[in-house]
């Protein structure tokens, strides 16, 4: 077990975004978090690297314990990579510069070492020929692959994906999912918030279904898609899989 989520809750004013959520994720496991809009999926995944502070409960990632009182997140952030919906690349830096920056600033890697790693990762995600370009010169799918390379450059134990394809044109979705599929096949521990149910069915070991701030159902991927246990999950799948 690499991640333990124990009875965590999170509110924004009067609105309770997470309600007593608990789960465990094993090393090397790929978990897809799905559910209707506003169900708490993105909030949950953002609590795992401290982007959202929990109000109660505890999260354990490896040897790091995250509680409402935790302020120093450097050790956590160095072991957890995050890929966002909108890429969050620095427009003034080249593709290579974007993948080098955190290596030199966070890990204090010498520039030649950071550059060698950045070049290798950009080759891995199919962008070795674009390293001198700036983000605005790339397609959305290419920008998201740069964002994945940037996250991988810090050698994370865990990768978090918060709807990584939802801002992309449909023809670009596949190129990002291919990179994620390769990561999963390589044994990376991954949690993905996504509406790509084909990807979830093909790649996920387990699915967490959320509704109204709660983890309503957890199941092996095949079991979830073939025979969801709750009415809410059945209703969600009947709507999303017929569109």
Image (cartoon, helix red, strand yellow):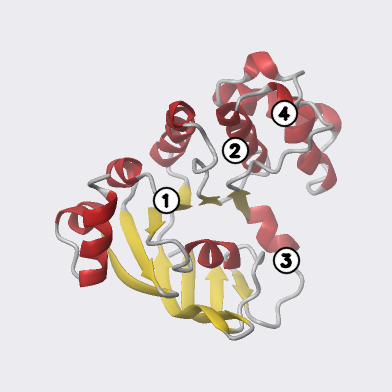
For marks 1 and 4, the one nearer the N-term is 1
Q: CA distance from mark 2 to mark 3?
A: 21 Å
241 and 67: which is toward the camera:
241
For marks 3 and 1, the one nearer the N-term is 1
Q: CA distance from mark 3 to mark 1?
A: 23 Å
Marks 2,3: beta carbons within 8 A: no
Secondary structure beneath label 2: helix
Secondary structure beneath label 3: loop
User: Which dot marks residue 148?
Assistant: 2
Name the residue that disc number 3 marks.
Answer: 73
Name the residue that disc number 1 marks.
Answer: 28
Which quadrant is home to the C terminus? top left
Q: CA distance from mark 4 to mark 3?
A: 28 Å
Marks 3,1: beta carbons within 8 A: no
- Estimate the x, y position of residue 77 in percent, counting from the top left: 68, 58
- Estimate the x, y position of residue 79 in percent, counting from the top left: 63, 55
Q: CA distance from mark 1 to mark 4?
A: 31 Å
Comparing marks 2 and 3, which lies closer to the viewer?
Answer: 2
Secondary structure beneath label 4: helix
Q: Residues within 10 Å of mark 4 (few under 14, many from 20)?
A: many
54 and 232: which is toward the camera:
232
Res. 116 in view = no
For marks 4 and 3, the one nearer the N-term is 3
Secondary structure beneath label 1: loop
Q: CA distance from mark 2 to mark 4?
A: 13 Å
In this rendering, is residue 54 above or below 197?
Answer: below
Q: Residue at x 52, y 35 (%)?
A: 168
In this rendering, is residue 112 above or below 46?
Answer: above
């Amino acid at each position: 077990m690499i991640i333990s989520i124990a009875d965590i809750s999170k509110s924004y004013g009067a609105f309770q975004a997470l309600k007593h959520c608990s789960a465990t994720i094993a090393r090397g496991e790929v978990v897809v978090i799905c559910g209707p809009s506003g169900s708490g999926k993105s909030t949950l995944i953002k609590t795992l690297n401290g982007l959202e502070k929990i109000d109660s409960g505890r999260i354990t990632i490896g040897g790091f314990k995250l509680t409402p009182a935790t302020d120093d997140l450097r050790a956590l952030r160095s072991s957890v990579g995050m890929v966002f919906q909108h890429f969050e690349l620095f427009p003034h830096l080249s593709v290579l510069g974007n993948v080098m920056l955190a290596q030199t600033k966070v890990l204090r890697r010498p520039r030649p070492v950071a550059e060698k790693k950045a070049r290798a990762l950009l080759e891995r995600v199919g962008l070795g020929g674009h390293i001198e370009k700036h983000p605005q010169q790339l397609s959305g799918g290419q920008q998201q692959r740069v964002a994945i390379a940037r996250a991988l450059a810090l050698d994370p134990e865990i990768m978090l994906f918060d709807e990584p394809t939802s801002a992309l044109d449909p023809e670009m979705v596949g190129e990002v999912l291919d990179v994620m599929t390769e990561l999963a096949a390589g044994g990376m521990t991954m949690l993905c918030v996504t509406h790509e149910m084909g990807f979830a069915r093909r790649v996920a070991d387990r699915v967490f279904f959320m509704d109204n701030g709660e983890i309503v159902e957890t199941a092996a991927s095949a079991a979830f898609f073939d025979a969801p246990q709750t009415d809410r999950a059945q209703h969600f799948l009947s709507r999303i899989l017929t569109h």
